[in-house]
Image (tube, grey):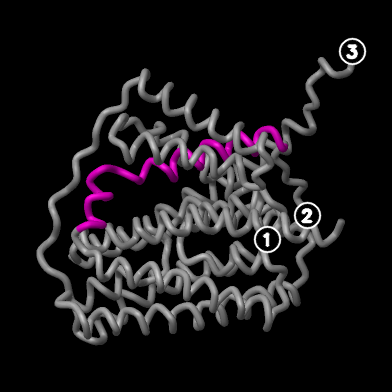
Amino acid sequence: MRSQIPDWTTVGRIAETMAIGAIGGLLFHYLGFPAGLVSGSIVAAAIAALAGRPLMVPPRMVRVILVLVGIALGSVVTPDTLKGFATYPASIALLVVSTIGITAAAGAYLLIVHRWNPVSALLGASPGALAQAIALSAEIGADARGVVVVQTLRVVLLAIGIPAGLAWFGLSGGAPPAPATVAGTSLGELAILVVVSTTASIVLVKVGFSAGWLFGAMLGSAALHGSGLIEARLPWWLANGAMVTMGAVTGSRFASLSPRMLLSYLLAALGSFAVGSAVAAAFAITVVMLLPVPAADVVMAFSPGAQDTMMLLALALHLDPVFVGAHHLARYMIVSVGIPLAANMIIRRTRKKAE
C-alpha cells in the first residue's frame, strides 16, 4: 500500500518552494518593489534554483493555483470601471491600436533578433497583465524564464522611469484622490465565484483550450464582477498566496540556467522594452496633440506596465484615477482576452504543421 504512505521528500520540497517564494515576495513587497509579491517570489525561487535547491510544485497544485490567479485577475473588472470606456472613446480607441502595435513590434523583435519561438515572443511582448503572462507561460510550455525576465524588467523600468520622467519634464497631477471603499465578501457569493470560475476552467480545458485553467477562471470571474452580479473577492491571503506560489513555480524554472543565457534574456528584455516604449510614446504624443487631456495622465495611461503597478503610481503622483484606470482596464481586457486566444491559435497551427 505504498500509495497511502506520504512521500515526505516531496512534501518537504513543496514546503521549501512555497516558503522561499513567500519570503522573497514579502521582502520585495515591504521594500516597495513593483508587483513585489510576484517579482520577489520569482527572484527568491530563481536564486534558490540556481543554487541547486530541488524546488517543486505538483501539477495538480499548479492547476488550483492557476484557477485562483484567474479568479483574482477577473475580479478587477467592475461595472464602474466599464463605464469609463464610454467617457473616453477616442483615446481608448487609440489605446487599442497602441496595444496591438506594441505587441506586434516587441514580439517581432524577440522573434527576429533573439530567435524566440512565436508563443514565447507573444507572451514576452504582452504589454501588461504580468501575472497572466507568467502563468500562461507555465501552463502552455513557453520559455517561462525568458518571459519572466522580459516582463519583470519592463515593469521595474516603467515604475522607476515614469515618476522620474514626469518630474524631469515638470509634469504633475492634481489633488490626491479620495480613498476607495472596500465592499465586504459573503460566503455565498464567494462560493458562487469559485464554482462558476472553476466550471469555466474545466469547460475550456475539455474543449482543448491550451490556457484553459487560467483563462476560464478569469472569464468566469470577470463576467460575474463586470455584470455586477457579485462583489465577492478571494480572501487577501488566498489571492496573494496564489500569486506568490505562481511566482515560486516560475522561479524554479531557472534551475541550470547559464550566465550566458541569463545575459541573453536581459538583452532581449532591454531591446523589447525600447521597441514597445517607442510605440507607446508615439501614441501618447498623438493623444496629447489631438485631445484636451493632461500630458501626465496620458503618459501614465499609455505606459505598457502592469495594471496594479500603474494604478499605484497614478495614485502616488495624484493623477486622474478614472482616466488612467479606464485605459489600463481597457488594455488589461484586450491583453487578457487576446493573448491567450492568439497563443492558442499559434499552438494549434504549430501542431497541424507537425502532423
Residue ID for mark 1:
346
Chain-order first, disc 3 or disc 1: 3
Residue at the image position 64 percent from the left and 76 percent from the top:
110
Relative to 301, residue 114 above or below:
below
- Residue at which label 2 appears: 52
- Between tags 1 and 2, which lies in front? 1
The region drawn magenta spans 59-86
Residue kind at label 2, given as amino acid type: Gly
Give the labeled residue for mark 3.
1
**Numbered disc 1: secondary structure:** helix
Percent x, y of residue 268: 62, 77
Residue type, label 3:
Met
Taking the spot 51% from the left edge, 53% from the top edge, the residue there is 131
Name the spot of residue 284 as percent of width and height, x first. Answer: 31, 79
**Which quadrant: the C terminus?**
bottom right
In whole angstroms, how far apart are the C-alphas of marks 3 and 1? 44 Å
Secondary structure under tag 3 reads loop
* Observer-nearest of 21 and 108: 108
